[in-house]
């Protein structure tokens, strides 16, 4: 039968074909393969030697470890760099991989991905996150790529998007179209800018849309940004659309109400919303303690917000706070 | 901020594929060594998935400071340290003029009072009274016969401690800073909770015929562990934690030997 799952490890000596039914099938449903001859028959020496009596592969298991030595597909995937311990956490994914045949199904898709521009060393990680693509219809995948190309996404851009949002090609053309339209309408940006945004954060297309809408509402209503300010912020740091609302509100509250930073400054440096509130708080308190917490560009010795959050600790201490790391650490221990 | 050792994020996948015999030959069986793919790191997964971490004396959400954690076998030491009944030292900040329902500065305001009449001497007098009453409780709960020479020697060295359960006891309290309306105290205590300390601030306010709220509770010492030993959040990584454990090991052992 075409579904022999005999191990195909190259180092082994010449394989001897045995009664294929003794190596049990891996699929759960196959109860039909009963050995035709009784196990208690007397057989000759040669025959006895020829039988490979390996322990039977379990019919059901919660881990792929039991099957990896017996499945060519799994073995090739491990050599590609797919982390099976992650994949087996989803039952559907594990089951899918076991039913696929490497030569017939998997190879085509791998070649397709390579054509698309996914690097060899990224294939493993990609498949770990999205093993379902190996079960997709090749034509459907090609149609979706053609759609993206028709929307004037370049080849390298498509490769980048697919690598960073592995589920992208699982979405039908219709769904992709809806999502692109959604972002264009909600954000009110030009087609070119929307595309640029999606290339930089392709997760937007594969994630849920409701939270994005809610985040936009939060920015407008609770944080009080104007529509054009929101457009600027989102274009600079699209991650805001997927950030947690609670965190956004807390960070904004601290920046605006406690540090006293006005909206227009936040629009200029939206990356502060991406950094951890703890970091902002610690650094601001240290600067306030030293009397250097000056965030107004019109005043002397002004400290820009992006420097406040993006510099590593040592540079922050020496350049901005003009103090030593030890002083900073001692100060932190008094909080 | 809790300056304390915490969880170490790490992946230690370090083992070689185990050899397993395979078979196959024309007529004879020849054993060949073949790596068992089931042991491949990508198939088996990370070696350490969970860590057993236990916590020492509680520190509530509003307080900060030294927080002792035990990892793996260290959890046993935690119980031993608990039974040593060592004192903890806190820096408690207070503010005169307000009283709130939960005794801290973030609670609902209950009353406002004047505080101009408070002076440092008055405060220190109250603190001395508190220390005195607590001293009596200390002697009572430590179950030592007061009339013995041994008791006298221990008392001189300051080693009298309750060795069992007891209500919160304050062994030392002194005023570090006094700048109306703010003040700062250093409190050495046993079997306390942070809320008890906040309540104490409130009561100090009442004794001084005013009112007070607690603005900060910060633990600077828990038994043998001080702020200098503690790790900041930026230092919560494997190397720092291992180093911290090594540095404190000697201190912990000496203390445990002394007491038990």
Image (tube, coloured by chain):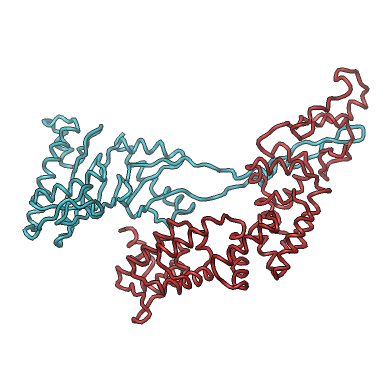
User: Measured from the top left, where is residue A137 in percent x and y?
Assistant: 77, 51
Side of B149 relative to A68 (left or right): left
Chain A on-screen colour: red
Locate residue A44 relative to residue A245 in the image: left or right. right
Estimate the x, y position of residue A133 in percent, counting from the top left.
72, 51
Q: Residue A152 is drawn in which quadrant? A: bottom right
Please state, as top left, top right, bottom left or bottom right, where the N terminus of chain B lies in the image. Answer: bottom left
Give the residue displayed 62% in from the left and 47% down from the top: B14
Q: Is residue A193 left or right of residue A254?
A: right
> In this view of the protein, which residue sits in the foreground, A258 or A147?
A147
Chain B, chosen colour in render: cyan
Q: Residue at x 48, y 58 (%)?
A: A214
Q: Toward the viewer: A251 or B158? A: A251
In x, y percent, where is residue B75?
A: 41, 38
Does B10 sit left or right of B90 as displayed?
right
> Eyeballing the image, is B182 above or below A3?
below
Q: Observer-nearest residue: A173 or B185? A: A173
Q: Residue A138: name its quadrant.
A: bottom right
Give the residue at x 65% y 51%: A129
Tell me what residue is drawn at x 88 percent, y 32 percent. Answer: A18
Residue B87, x across and y down, in percent: 25, 43
On screen, A327 above or below A127? Answer: below
Residue A114's place in the image compared with B33, above or below, is below
């Amino acid at each position: 039968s075409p579904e022999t799952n005999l191990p195909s490890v190259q180092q082994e000596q010449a394989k001897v074909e045995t009664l294929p039914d003794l190596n049990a099938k891996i699929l759960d449903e196959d109860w039909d393969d009963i050995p035709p001859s009784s196990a208690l028959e007397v057989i000759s020496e040669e025959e006895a030697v020829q039988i490979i009596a390996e322990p039977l592969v379990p019919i059901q298991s919660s881990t792929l470890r039991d099957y990896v030595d017996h499945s060519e597909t799994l073995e090739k995937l491990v050599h590609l760099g797919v982390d099976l311990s992650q994949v087996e956490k989803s039952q559907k994914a594990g089951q899918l991989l076991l039913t696929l045949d490497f030569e017939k199904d998997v190879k085509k898709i791998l070649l397709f991905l390579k054509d698309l521009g996914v690097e060899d060393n990224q294939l493993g990680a990609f498949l770990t996150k999205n093993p379902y693509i190996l079960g997709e219809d090749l034509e459907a995948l090609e149609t979706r790529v053609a759609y993206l190309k028709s929307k004037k996404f370049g080849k390298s851009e498509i490769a980048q998007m697919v690598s960073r949002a592995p589920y992208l090609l699982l979405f039908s053309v219709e769904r992709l179209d809806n999502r692109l339209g959604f972002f264009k309408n909600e954000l009110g940006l030009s087609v070119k800018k929307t595309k640029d945004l999606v290339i930089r954060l392709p997760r937007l297309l594969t994630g849920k849309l409701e939270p994005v809408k809610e985040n936009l509402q939060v920015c407008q209503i609770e944080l009080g940004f104007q529509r054009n300010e929101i457009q600027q912020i989102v274009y600079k740091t699209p991650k805001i659309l997927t950030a947690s609302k609670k965190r956004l509100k807390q960070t904004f509250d601290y920046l605006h109400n406690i540090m006293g930073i006005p909206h227009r400054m936040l629009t200029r440096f939206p990356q502060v919303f991406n950094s951890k509130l703890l970091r902002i708080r610690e650094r601001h308190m240290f600067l306030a303690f030293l009397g250097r917490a000056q965030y107004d560009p019109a005043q002397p010795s002004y400290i820009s917000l992006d420097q406040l959050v993006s510099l590593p600790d040592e540079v922050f201490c020496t350049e901005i706070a003009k103090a030593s790391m030890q002083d900073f650490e001692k100060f932190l221990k008094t909080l | 901020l809790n300056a304390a050792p915490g969880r170490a994020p790490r992946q230690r996948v370090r083992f070689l594929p185990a050899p397993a015999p395979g078979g196959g030959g024309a007529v004879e069986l020849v054993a060949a060594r073949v790596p068992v793919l089931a042991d491949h790191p990508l198939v088996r997964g990370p070696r350490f998935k969970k860590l057993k971490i236990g916590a020492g004396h509680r520190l509530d959400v509003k307080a900060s400071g030294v927080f002792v954690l035990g990892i793996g076998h260290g959890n046993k030491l935690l119980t031993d340290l608990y039974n040593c009944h060592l004192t903890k030292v806190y820096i408690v900040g207070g503010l005169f003029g307000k009283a709130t329902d939960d005794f801290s500065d973030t609670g609902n305001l209950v009353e406002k009072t004047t505080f101009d009449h408070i002076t440092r001497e008055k405060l220190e007098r109250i603190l001395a009274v508190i220390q005195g009453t607590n001293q009596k409780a200390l002697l009572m709960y430590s179950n030592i016969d007061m009339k013995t020479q041994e008791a006298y020697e221990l008392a001189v060295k300051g080693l009298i401690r309750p060795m069992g359960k007891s209500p919160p006891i304050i062994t030392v309290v002194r005023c570090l800073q006094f700048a109306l309306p703010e003040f700062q105290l250093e409190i050495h205590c046993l079997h306390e909770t942070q809320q008890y300390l906040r309540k104490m601030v409130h009561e100090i306010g009442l004794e001084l015929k005013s009112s007070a709220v607690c603005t900060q509770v910060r633990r600077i010492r828990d038994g043998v562990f001080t702020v200098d030993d503690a790790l900041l959040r930026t230092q919560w990584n494997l190397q720092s934690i291992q180093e911290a454990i090594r540095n404190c090991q000697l201190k912990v052992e000496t203390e445990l030997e002394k007491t038990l």
